[in-house]
Image (tube, rainbow, N blue to C red):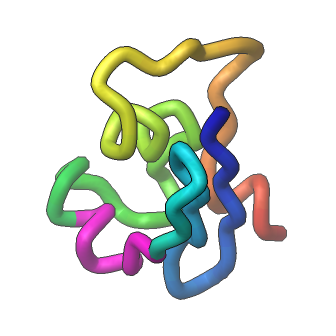
């Protein structure tokens, strides 16, 4: 299971027991979108090849505010 924790500057990720951080700039480069317009599902796709996407995608801007 992958855990994502969002803040204004990036995302803390726990993937298969490994913890790391995806910075805001990296996410914007990978998605070609403003950080706050990227969805949690898009971030999960950066981390995992074939993620199990449940529920409705939520914008980072909506999650942290």
Residue that appears at 29% across and 25% down: 49
**Is 22 included in the stretch rendered in magenta?**
yes
Overall secondary structure of the magenta section:
helix
- Give the left or right position of residue 29, taking residue 22 as reference: left
Q: Which residues are magenta?
A: 21-28
Q: Nearer the viewer, residue 40 or 50?
A: 50
Determine whether 56 is above or below 63 in the image: above
Q: Quadrant of residue 42?
A: top left
Image quadrant containing the C terminus: bottom right
> Relative to 40, does residue 54 appear above or below in the rendering?
above
Q: Is residue 27 left or right of residue 10?
A: left
Q: Classify residue 22 as left or right of residue 28.
A: right
Check the image and report above or below for 55 versus 46: above
Taking the spot 65% from the left edge, 54% from the top edge, the residue there is 4
- Residue 28, x across and y down, in percent: 27, 64
**Coordinates of residue 8 in the picture (x, y in percent):** 61, 83
Front-most of residues 21 and 16: 16
Name which residue lies at 51% across and 77% down.
10
Q: From the viewer's side, name the closer residue of 11 and 31.
A: 11
Q: Quadrant of residue 29?
A: bottom left
Quadrant where the N terminus sits is top right
Q: Residue furthest right?
A: 65
Q: Going by the image, does 17 lie left or right of 10?
A: right
Q: Identify the residue at horizontal 38%, vertical 79% (top origin).
A: 23
Residue situated furthest front in the rendering: 17
Q: Name the foreground residue: 28 vs 49.
A: 49
* Residue 2 among magenta residues: no
Residue 60, placed above or below residue 7 = above
């Amino acid at each position: 299971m992958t855990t994502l924790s969002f803040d204004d500057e990036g995302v803390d990720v726990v993937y298969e027991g490994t913890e790391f951080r995806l910075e805001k700039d990296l996410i914007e480069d990978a998605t070609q979108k403003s950080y706050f317009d990227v969805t949690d599902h898009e971030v999960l796709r950066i981390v995992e090849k074939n993620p199990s996407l449940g529920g409705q995608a939520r914008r980072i801007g909506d999650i942290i505010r």
